Image: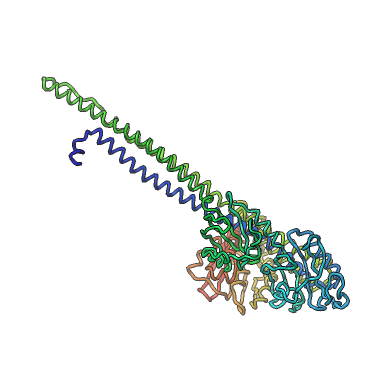
């Protein structure tokens, strides 16, 4: 081989060296580009499916919350209802059922003589059973809307569980008069005593119809299951609804998914679809309200079709590029050897002339200029590769735009949450106005607190919208002269009931002559409420939360101090990041989204202020500090 290479003409050596070198470099570069592009495309395909699952699960959760809120409204209105007018309550239940087509039934049920003390007068009358108890059930079961007495309330969970636990109940699917339904039930507690329930029923047919609207790719579909894995919907096998569970399929991956669903966690698995036999990826996400889960079943080949198409396209482009570069390499080799041949001819001419005594011949080939074509040709090749790389990068950027779907969905969900808030606030205002019975002064005061807290919850929903506006750089502030002391006093008055229920002492120490500041009253209220709510949330029973405010130089300084669980030193720096939470175990115990402190920080910064936390460590409490300038004339947001 050595001898053969040594005797090979220079032109051939150059052609082989250039072409083989280019081939190896470009083959390696192409392989890296294909691998990177397909990996990113596959990752984005997975992410898109995960986000789609979460978005639909959140929408489904919004519907569940809306249904639950109606049941809560019914029960809460009965707590303060003292008119004892059965016809009036029946009219309310009927109207709610007519105005909410998603519902199949609305009802209340009271303990013996707990409603008006007249059960004996109503025994075996229309809408009552032989006991005469007030147990009206307005329902669409069987077709037309009608009234009938509730059945099996002495045995079924929809009545017995809230009675025994005095807590809200969202039942597992159960048969009632031949209809498979789910009940959202809230106990009616008066003076600490259980006197009945208020609730609504939702047919699984409605859930099945809604879920069957979901379509992904060509043949993908969606399922809904209960916490225990009971199928609540199926696009093909309707006989499985309410009778078949995920564990019945005896597939190890599906059984693993069922365990996650029971624990309220999301994820994805790869398995064979029990319905079609195709290889699929199942993405699942919990629906928080009602302990249900949403499952997206996506055929793997359809989900990754874009990845396969992109890879094939890149391979074709790469092969064409290799042939093109091979031809270009051949031309470069010729351009290199031609001036060398000219030099050889010149030297031969000079040597022949010298043999005949002629010494004036000169070689005039400009080799350096000719060799400059090689880097020019290589640059053209690299330009072609860069163009392909730029096109791939552009495609990846377009795929990343899918991430913005989360922000848009966040805004949409925030709007959807306003529906149950409107119901709560509306019915509470009816109570305050005496349209559902006259209230005494203390009751009116309590109802006013409910209205204020409904408004506060509305502001929290607006915080979600505020977050989406932050990301869109579209936040609006309304600055005016406000009194921080009054804001804090109202907040603590509203939060005191929550603190008392938890057994936490709520103390206020506000400097009497605090000056007014220039700020957005609603945003400041949201910020301080977030901080106080966190302090109560993370302080155990028997603890203490102290809110102090004083003037410090040119600022109003607010300190919220608690005797709660504290914060590890290494986590304080990350505390105000968006969606940051200390750890999963605390998230499960105390709840929260990781948005409150992030939003509070943006509000403080918008007022040219500051917010920070201090803690001596776990179990030693936390101090949250807020500073807002007193004179703040440069707020233009």
Q: Residue at x 53, y 76 (%)?
A: 619
| Left or right of 520 in this view: 379 | left
Looking at the image, residue 374 lies above or below residue 364: below
Front position in the image: 387 or 259: 259
Looking at the image, residue 380 lies above or below residue 209: above
Q: Quadrant of residue 136?
A: bottom right
Q: Quadrant of the N terminus?
A: top left
Q: Residue at x 85, y 67 (%)?
A: 88
Q: Quadrant of residue 531?
A: bottom right
Residue 106 on image: x %, y %: 77, 66
Residue 523 on image: x %, y %: 65, 60
Q: Residue at x 29, y 30 (%)?
A: 334
Front position in the image: 244 or 386: 244
Q: Residue at x 70, y 65 (%)?
A: 180
Q: Is residue 455 visible?
A: yes
Front position in the image: 303 or 112: 303
């Amino acid at each position: 081989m050595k001898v053969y290479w040594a005797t090979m003409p220079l032109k051939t050596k150059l052609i082989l060296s250039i072409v083989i070198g280019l081939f190896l470099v470009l083959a390696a570069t192409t392989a890296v580009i294909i691998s990177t592009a397909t990996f990113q495309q596959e990752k984005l395909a997975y992410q898109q499916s995960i986000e789609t699952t979460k978005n639909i699960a959140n929408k489904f959760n919004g519907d569940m919350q809306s249904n639950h809120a109606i049941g809560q409204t019914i029960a809460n209105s009965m707590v303060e209802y003292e008119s004892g007018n059965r016809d009036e309550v029946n009219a309310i239940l009927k109207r709610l059922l007519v105005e909410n087509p998603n519902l199949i039934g609305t009802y209340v049920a009271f303990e013996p003589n707990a409603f008006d003390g007249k059960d004996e007068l109503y025994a075996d009358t229309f809408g009552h059973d032989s006991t005469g108890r007030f147990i009206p059930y307005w329902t669409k079961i069987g077709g037309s809307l009608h009234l009938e007495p509730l059945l099996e309330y002495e045995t079924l969970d929809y009545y017995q569980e809230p009675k025994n636990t005095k807590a809200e109940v969202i039942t597992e699917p159960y048969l009632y008069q031949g209809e498979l339904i789910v009940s959202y039930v809230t106990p009616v507690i008066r003076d600490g005593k259980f006197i009945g329930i208020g609730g609504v029923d939702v047919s699984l047919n409605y859930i099945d119809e809604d879920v069957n609207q979901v379509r992904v790719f060509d043949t993908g579909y969606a399922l809904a299951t209960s916490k225990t894995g009971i199928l609540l919907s199926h696009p093909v096998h309707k006989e499985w609804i309410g009778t078949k569970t995920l564990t019945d399929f005896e597939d190890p991956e599906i059984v693993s998914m069922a365990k996650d669903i029971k624990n309220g966690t999301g994820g994805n698995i790869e398995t064979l679809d029990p319905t079609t036999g195709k290889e699929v990826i199942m993405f699942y996400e919990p629906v928080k309200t009602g302990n249900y889960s949403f499952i997206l079943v996506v055929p793997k080949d359809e989900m990754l079709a874009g990845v396969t198409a992109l890879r094939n396209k890149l391979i074709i482009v790469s092969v064409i590029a290799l042939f093109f570069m091979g031809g270009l390499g051949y031309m470069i080799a010729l351009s290199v050897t031609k001036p060398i041949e000219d030099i050889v001819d010149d030297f031969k001419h000079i040597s022949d002339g010298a043999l005949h005594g002629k010494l004036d011949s000169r070689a005039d080939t400009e080799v350096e200029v000719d060799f400059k074509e090689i880097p020019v040709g290589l640059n053209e090749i690299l330009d072609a590769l860069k163009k392909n790389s730029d096109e791939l990068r552009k495609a990846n950027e377009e795929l990343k735009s899918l991430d913005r779907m989360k922000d848009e969905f966040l805004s949409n969900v925030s709007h959807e949450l306003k529906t149950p808030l409107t119901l709560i606030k509306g019915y509470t205002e009816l109570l305050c106005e005496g349209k559902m019975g006259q209230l005494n002064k203390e009751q009116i005061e309590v109802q006013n607190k409910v209205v204020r807290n409904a408004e506060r919850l509305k502001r929290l929903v607006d915080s979600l919208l505020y977050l989406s506006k932050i990301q869109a750089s579209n936040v609006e502030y309304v600055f005016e002269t406000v009194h921080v002391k009054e804001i804090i006093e109202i907040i603590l008055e509203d939060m005191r009931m929550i603190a008392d229920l938890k057994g936490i002492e709520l103390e206020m120490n506000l400097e009497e002559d605090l000056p007014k500041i220039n700020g957005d009253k609603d945003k400041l209220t949201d910020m301080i409420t977030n901080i106080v709510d966190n302090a109560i949330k993370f302080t155990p029973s028997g603890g203490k939360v102290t809110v102090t405010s004083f003037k410090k130089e040119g600022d109003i300084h607010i300190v919220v101090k608690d005797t709660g669980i504290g914060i590890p030193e290494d986590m304080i720096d990350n505390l105000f990041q968006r969606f940051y939470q200390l750890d999963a175990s605390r998230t499960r115990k105390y709840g929260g989204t990781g948005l409150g402190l992030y939003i509070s920080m943006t509000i403080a910064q918008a007022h040219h202020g500051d917010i920070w936390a201090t803690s001596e460590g776990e179990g030693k409490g936390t101090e949250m500090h807020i500073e807002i300038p007193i004179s703040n004339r440069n707020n233009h947001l």
